[in-house]
Structure formats: structure tokens, C-alpha cells
């Protein structure tokens, strides 16, 4: 009898130790300031990731997300109307989904993604930026330069990227202080029926934003559809989703299509200060049903 008890506790001890370690693992428990100008990029897995707000939510709308498992969406949502929280989990490898959440008449933007090499978050708590408990916990509620990057500013940055070559040709060196530019020689991402090439990278240091001019080449005899909002820029194991995208969502057969996307800061709203010389890759989410395509 004693030997059985000893054997039982030997089996149970590792689980207890792992549970104790996970209890204090802040890598999977996050707390961010509420900011409608921030895109929250959240890694998820096959276990629920719960997002909490300070109060009841008005509405939730999304892409590649469903509250019914019968729809076989890449991301499964669990939410009850009027609650102050919701949960999501990945239903397939490399799942990606997006949600717009309305809280106190403001829209908060979430991108969810699954990657086998990244630990999924278990809880994400959004708090008012003036929450004293957040400051005391050391989560950095203080404001950063990211709040200057409003939607109108992002539109302006894309316009400046599009006109960069024309202005630089007419007035050489005039833009050097506010825009860093690089035309990388070999930044290509190959897919089964199409490939993606980065033609130009523009960095706007004041706004901590990188803009990309991208060429998508369709080698097949049929049109290819993709979701502009779900494109991502990959640097090593890190994914950055667009703060703004200007793309058609369609690559005609045997043709090229041009797209512009921009990424801003880190997912938690801090500065990223990314170099334009990183080995970037462009991740494109192909859409099989054109009826589900959302054009920005």
C-alpha cells in the first residue's frame, strides 16, 4: 500500500511543479493599456485565450472567426452578449483571424494568429491607461509616440511612400531626414501558385512605421484572392500585422498586382524601431471563397 502511495506521488509531483511554474509565468498573462489606435496582435493556441475589458462590450465583428464549430473557421470565438470578456482558440495550424470589438463607443482591433514556435497567451487584460494598479505592476501604462499614428496619419504615410520616387527625383535628398528608403534585391516569398516580392521599404522614424510596396505575381490561369487585412510581415519568428493596407485582394491570372501595407510599433503599443534591413517575409492568407473577401 505504501509503495503504491509513493508511486502515485512521484507521478503527481511533476504536474504540481509545472502548475506552480505556469501560475507565475507572465509570458502568457498579459496586461495592456486600452488604446483604439493600437492593433493588438495576440498569439493563440488550441487552448482558450481570454480577453477582458473594464466593462461590457457593445459588439464584436470579425473575419476568419466564428462562434460555431460547424462553420470550421480557423479561429473559434466564445462570447455571450453583454459580457466584458470573450475567448478565442485556434482550430487548425497556422490559424489567423481578426476581430473589431466595440467598447464605450470606440473600436478596438485584434489580430489573432497561431504559430507552432510561439507560446500562446492565456489571458489578456485591457485596462484604462490611467489605472494605478497597472502602473504599480510595472506594465508600462505611460504614453508613447505610437499614439500619434492615427488612421489619417497612416493614410498620409502611405501616400508619401507612393510619391517618394517622384519627389526624390525632383528634389534629391529633401526627404532623407523624415524617410529612410531601401529597395531590397532578393526579398521574395514563394507560394504554390503565386509569389510575393518586396519592391520598396520606407521607414518613418517619427511614427515608428514601416511601409512596404509589394508585387504579387500570379503564375496560374485563375484569379487568386487574398485577405488584405490578414497579410503579415514576418521577421524570424515574429509576425507584424498591418496597421493599414492598400490592396485589391485579387491577383488576376498570369498577372502582377501591387499592394501597399504598413506596420506600426509592437503589438502592445510600444515602439519597435525596426530596421529596414531586416530579412522580411510577406505572409498572405489566400481566400477560397471570394464572397468572404473584405477590402479595406
Image (cartoon, grey):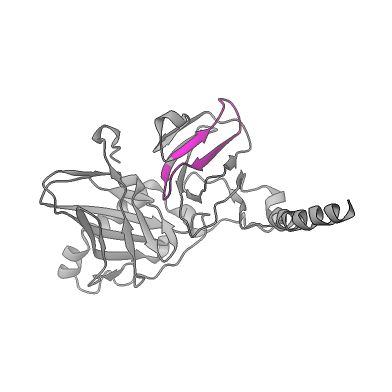
Residue 147 % position (x, y): 48, 53
Verify whether residue 92 appears in magenta: yes
- Residue drawn at x 43%, y 36% is 65
The quadrant of the rendering that contains the C terminus is: top left
Q: In this view, does 77 lie to the left or right of 230?
A: right
**Furthest residue to the right?**
2
Q: In this view, does 39 lie to the left or right of 87?
A: left
Verify whether residue 193 appears in magenta: no
- Residue drawn at x 68%, y 55% is 22
Q: Where 111 falls versus 87 (above or below)? A: below
Segment colored magenta = 75-97
Quadrant location of residue 169?
bottom left
Pick the residue in front: 97 or 4.
Answer: 4
Residue 88 % position (x, y): 52, 40
Quadrant location of residue 86?
top right
Residue 157 % position (x, y): 31, 56
Q: In this view, does 296 lie to the left or right of 162?
A: right
- Residue drawn at x 33%, y 71% is 177
Amino acid at each position: 500500500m505504501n509503495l503504491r502511495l509513493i508511486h502515485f506521488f512521484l507521478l503527481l509531483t511533476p504536474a504540481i511543479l509545472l502548475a506552480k511554474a505556469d501560475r507565475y509565468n507572465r509570458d502568457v498573462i498579459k496586461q495592456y493599456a486600452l488604446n483604439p489606435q493600437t492593433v493588438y496582435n495576440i498569439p493563440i493556441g488550441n487552448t482558450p485565450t481570454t480577453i477582458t475589458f473594464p466593462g461590457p462590450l457593445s459588439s464584436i465583428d470579425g473575419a476568419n472567426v466564428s462562434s460555431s464549430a460547424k462553420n470550421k473557421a480557423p479561429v473559434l470565438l466564445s462570447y455571450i452578449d453583454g459580457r466584458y470578456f470573450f475567448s478565442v482558440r485556434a482550430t487548425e495550424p497556422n490559424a489567423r483571424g481578426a476581430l473589431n470589438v466595440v467598447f464605450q463607443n470606440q473600436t478596438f482591433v485584434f489580430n489573432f494568429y497561431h504559430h507552432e514556435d510561439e507560446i500562446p497567451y492565456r489571458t489578456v487584460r485591457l485596462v484604462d491607461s490611467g489605472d494605478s494598479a497597472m502602473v504599480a505592476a510595472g506594465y508600462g501604462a505611460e504614453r508613447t509616440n505610437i499614439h500619434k499614428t492615427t488612421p489619417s496619419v497612416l493614410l498620409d504615410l502611405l501616400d508619401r511612400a507612393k510619391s517618394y520616387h517622384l519627389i526624390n527625383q525632383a528634389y534629391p535628398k529633401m526627404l532623407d531626414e523624415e524617410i529612410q528608403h531601401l529597395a531590397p534585391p532578393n526579398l521574395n516569398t514563394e507560394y504554390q501558385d503565386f509569389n510575393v516580392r518586396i519592391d520598396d521599404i520606407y521607414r518613418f522614424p517619427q511614427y515608428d512605421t514601416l511601409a512596404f510596396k509589394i508585387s504579387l505575381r500570379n503564375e496560374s490561369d485563375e484569379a487568386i484572392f487574398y485577405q488584405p487585412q490578414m497579410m503579415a510581415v514576418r521577421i524570424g519568428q515574429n509576425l507584424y500585422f498591418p496597421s493599414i493596407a492598400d490592396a485589391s485582394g485579387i491577383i488576376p491570372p498570369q498577372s502582377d498586382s501591387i499592394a501597399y501595407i504598413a506596420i506600426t510599433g509592437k503589438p502592445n503599443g510600444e515602439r519597435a524601431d525596426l530596421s529596414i534591413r531586416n530579412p522580411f517575409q510577406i505572409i498572405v492568407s489566400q481566400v477560397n471563397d471570394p464572397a468572404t473577401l473584405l477590402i479595406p
